[in-house]
Every structure is written in structure tokens, then in C-alpha cells.
Amino acid sequence: SAAREPIGVIGTGYVGLVTAAGFAELGSDVVCVDIDAEKVARLNRGEIPIYEPGLAELVAKNRERLTFTTDIAPALERARLLFVAVGTPPTYSGDADLSAVNAVVGAMPASDRHALVMKSTVPVGTGANTKRLFAEQGKSGFRYVSCPEFLKEGTAVADFLAPDRVVVGDDGDWAGDAVVDLYRPLLVPDEGGNGPGQLVRTDIASAEMVKLASNAFLATKISFINEIANVCEETGADVVEVARGMGLDERIGPKFLNAGIGFGGSCFPKDVTALKQLAGNSGYHFQLLNSVIEVNELQKRRVIGKLEKHLGGLVGKRIALLGLAFKPNTDDMREASSLVLAARLQAAGADVVAHDPISGEVAKPMLRGVELAPDALSAAHGADAVVLVTEWQEFRDLDLADLRAAMRGDVLIDGRNALDGEAAVAAGLRYEGIGRTARSAAPAAAGV
Ligand code: UDX
């Protein structure tokens, strides 16, 4: 088979590192550039700075195809395509902070043989702005491709290698063709590959919008089922049964209908706000997204109300949180519901103790005054109430009689509907999930 095109990847965070290792696995030489010299040094020593299942193995396996450097020059020298995967954190207003992206744009030389391939999640219009900047800086030969990333933390490697779709937005030039060729092996047979990926080749603005709209839609789905859950609590219905019944309608689908204590992570909160701001900046008031965000904030706090109801107040009560990361199989604490919960419990006078299988070290500086326990049962030791915050498998597997025996009180709030409510009641616990009562509560199926 033909030699694979070498590429550069700028930014070695989650998206950059997975993209680099993924394309190396497909046969490309990849020059990874990051301004963080310490991170580059660690990567050169073979250390992976983030926890992502399968990533260390993929990097190690393709080590000879991967170069890590703080210098952009070797990337420009060896590659035509420079994938940009730098951070676009929210600013105070909720707009995406494009300073890192703009620094990359500014660092590019005048060239007719290079293209920026944007992986970072950016506002619609960033491609057009970048092309304008290039023109102003006398670099109008520099091509631009929007190629949004849809990987999920925890399954990022698998998501890269088996994408649902590959979105390529460009001006119909060599750069777009080259990006499609890189992804070819992952595309469906009709597109010349042997993977599941459907190709969406489109204009730059539409590609940019696909990413924001997809994340906003998924966030909407979660806030929607969370509100259904809240109504279920008032009416005696069980949201897990309701979601099952809804999800069998092919137009709805079963995924992202798990009610819980709200969504977090590096993407959903940021992208929903960014899309709302983007719409607002262009004069359109995106009504629905305001509610999606507000419902998510309220959902994190509802657990406090449940605890108050069961414990008759929170002052001096010992509350154990099981799970801190924003979802299982990651150490990522960004926008984690646990942060809001811990802070509010402390403000209400409770003592908070927590355990997370891996995010403890990351979480420590963010959770002042929260005691970190080495395992779930030690966290539960002497607690008046236990709250399941993140549905790690080891919590699903907990022996609920052991849990009850470790506790001082008997309240178990299942913030992810991941535990067996009947078993909890049988173990002598006062169980409450989200949008269901113990009477009906069997654990929701994992992994949807
Ligand atoms: C998400 C998108 O899924 C991905 O396509 C995009 O590229 C980045 O953002 P990620 O942030 O890794 O990925 O996590 P995801 O698995 O989507 O979960 C996001 C949050 O929603 C988590 O806090 C999770 O607990 C919550 N969630 C998810 C629910 O509360 N209910 C659900 O049914 C699904």
C-alpha cells in the first residue's frame, strides 16, 4: 500500500494525543508539537500525561512514528497537514477563548503547500476568520480544513479508530482531499475503506456547526430526560422504564437517556454555552439552550434537597460521595457534578468524604476540606448518607450489605440510577434514585 501522508499535530491534550497516536497507528509519521516543554519531556520519556484507556499502549506501539517537540519547524518541514488540537476554554462571557488557536495561526509562515486542519472545537466562523487573518498576513496560500472531533473520554481510542462519521469541511481543494485520504481506512467500503465511518464532506461553516449542534443536542437529550425524571418523582413513574419505552422508538434511540445528577466534562457545558453565545452574538436568542444549562445546574442541586429530606438537615452530617470524575473511566474533573455537590454540602454544614478510583490526585486541590478515602467502604465508614455520583463499575459491584454495615446512617442516594434499589432496601438502606422509587428500582443497564 502507498506510504501514508506524514502529519503534524499541534497540542498534545486529549484530542491531540489521541489523534496523533491514531494516525500513527494508521501508518503516518506524526510530529507532535506542544508549547509545554515539561509535557513534551514527559512524552519523550514515554509517559502519558492523561488517563485514557488504551492510549499508552497505542503510543508505545507506534513510538517510532511519533516525534514530540516544542518546535513547530520540524512539523512544517515534514508535513503538509497541521492538525490543530489546542484548548478553547470558555471565557467569562461563555465565548470560546481562541487565543491558543490564534497563536497557532500567527505562527504559520507564508506557504502554498500547507493547511491547518482544525480539530479544536471553535465557534462557527473561525475558519472564515482564519482565512481572513491569513490573507491579511500575506499567507493566503495557506489552506484551512475543519475536521471536528467527536471522541468521548474513556473510549477515545476506540472512537478514533471506529468513528460513526468523519466530517471534513473545506474549500474543495487538495487539503480536504488529503484529510479524507488520511481517514480513508476508517470510512465505509463505499468510500474505499473498511470501517464504519460515514463521510460528510461539506463547507467549513457547516462542519463547524455539526460539532456544536451535536454536542448541544446530546446535552439537550440529557436535560430533557432529567426533567422527565423530576416529573416521574412527583407522579410515581420510573424514569428508567420510561426511557426504555421511549428509546425503542428508532427516531429517539436508547442512548443518552440516562437520568442523573447532570452532565459535566470538558465539552458539553462549554459547547452548549459557546453555541448559545455564538447565536446571541449573531443576533439570535437560542431559547432552548438557556433551559438546557439551567436544568443541568438545578439537577446537581436536587441531590441536596433529597439529603435534607432524609436526614432532616445537613449540619454535622457526614456525607460520603462515591465517584468524583465527571463520568467513569476518566480522571477528568472538569465541570464534574461532584465539585458543586461537595461545595454545597460543605456550605450547608455537612462533613464530606469521597472516594474515586482514579481521580483522587487530580481532585484533591479542587476539593478543599473534603476527606479522600482509599476505597468505597472506608468512605462510607461512619457516614449518615452515601451518594453515588459517578457510576464506576466498582460501585455497581458493591455489596450493599457491606455498605450498610460500614455506615452510621442508612441513606443511599443513587445519583446515576446504577444500583439495585431492591437489594439496597433488602440491605436495610433508605434508597432513592433519580426519577424512581425503591419499589421499582432495578439498576439501569450499563453503557448506554
Ligand atoms: C462528549 C461527546 O459525547 C463527544 O462526542 C464530544 O466529542 C465531547 O463531549 P465526553 O465529554 O467525553 O464526550 O462525555 P460523554 O460520555 O458524552 O458524557 C458527558 C456527560 O453527560 C457526563 O457527565 C455523563 O455522566 C452525562 N450523561 C451522559 C448523562 O448524564 N446521561 C446520559 O444519558 C449520558
Image (tube, helix red, strand yellow):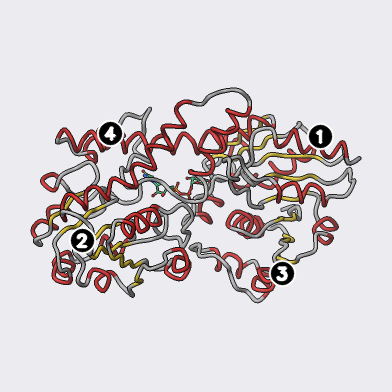
Instruction: For the residues labelled 2 and 4, say whether their Cβ atoms are less than 8 Å apart.
Output: no
Residue for badge 3? 37
Asked if ligand 1 lies within 8 A of label 1, the reply is no
Between 202 and 64, the one nearer to me in the picture? 202
Which numbered marker is on residue 228? 4
Q: Which of marks 2 and 1 is nearer the N terminus?
A: 1
Residue at x 66% of width, y 69% of height: 39
Residue type (three-letter) at the residue carrying disc 4 = Ile
Q: Which amino acid does label 3 sit on?
A: Ala
Tell me where residue 176 appears, x and y as whole percent: 73, 38
Q: Name the residue under label 1.
A: 132
Structural distance between the alpha carbons of marks 3 and 2: 45 Å
> N-terminal of the two: label 2 or label 4?
4
Work out whether residue 188 can be spotted.
no
Callout 4 environment at 10 Å: few (<14), some (14 to 19), or many (20+)?
some
For label 2, the crowd category at 10 Å Cα-Cα, with few meaning under 14, some 14 to 19 and many 20 or more, is many
Which of the two residues, 189 or 103, is positioned nearer the viewer here?
103
Q: Does the residue labelled 4 lie within 8 Å of ligand 1?
A: no
Residue designated by label 2 = 385
Residue 129 horizontal/vertical position (percent): 75, 35
Report how far apart the C-alphas of labels 2 and 4 lie in the structure.
Answer: 25 Å
- First in sequence: mark 3 or mark 1? 3
